[in-house]
Amino acid sequence: MLALDVGSKRIGVAGSDALGLTAQAIETLQRARLEDDLAHLAHLAASRGAEAFVLGLPRNMDGSEGFQAEDTRAFAQALQEKAGLPVLFVDERLTTRAAHNVLIEGNVRRKDRKKVVDKLAAVLILESYLQGL
């Protein structure tokens, strides 16, 4: 299982262990061309034996979906077609904020937080999914 925190500039990637019990940060992918991003993620999923993708679905605080959710759904459709794997969604409201808070509490410098916040958000998305099983 691979979890993604899809943003316009970066994609945080996390993966589960073989038993699907824990989530580990894998990487932060700097966005390039859509086709390049999809090819990289499809290759990563194949090399790790992933059976599905879990994407954080950004929702407004009232639970409605805005333009970011539309972009994420479009990305998910393209990813599913490229990788041939199912794509599942998890509500990601406040996930990035929670990731920032964890890093601040861990005394990670602001400059360094930017490098890891997206993959930490992906870990939180995957943990949320795994807890819901």
Image: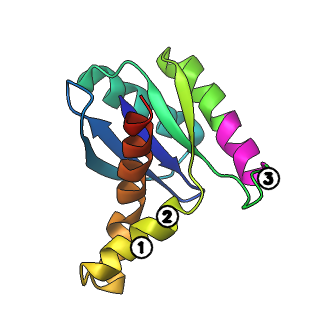
Q: Earlier in the sequence, mark 2 or mark 3?
A: 3
Q: Quadrant of the N terminus?
A: top left
Residue drawn at the location 50% of the way across and 59% of the way down: 95
**Disc 1 versus disc 2: distance between alpha carbons?**
6 Å
Q: Which residues are magenta?
A: 65-74
Q: Say if residue 36 shows up in the picture.
A: yes
**Residue 129's x, y, as percent?**
44, 37
Q: Residue at x 63, y 36 (%)?
A: 75
Contact, mark 1 vs mark 2 (Cβ under 8 Å): yes
Residue wearing tag 1:
100
Numbered disc 3: secondary structure: loop
Q: Are marks 2 and 3 in contact (CB under 8 Å)?
A: no
Residue depicted at 24% across the width and 84% down the height: 107
Q: Marks 2 and 3, how far apart in space?
A: 17 Å
Q: Position of residue 22 (x, y in %)?
A: 24, 39
Neighbourhood count class around disc 2 (C-alpha, 10 Å): few under 14, some 14–19, many 20 upward: some
Q: CA distance from mark 1 to mark 3?
A: 22 Å
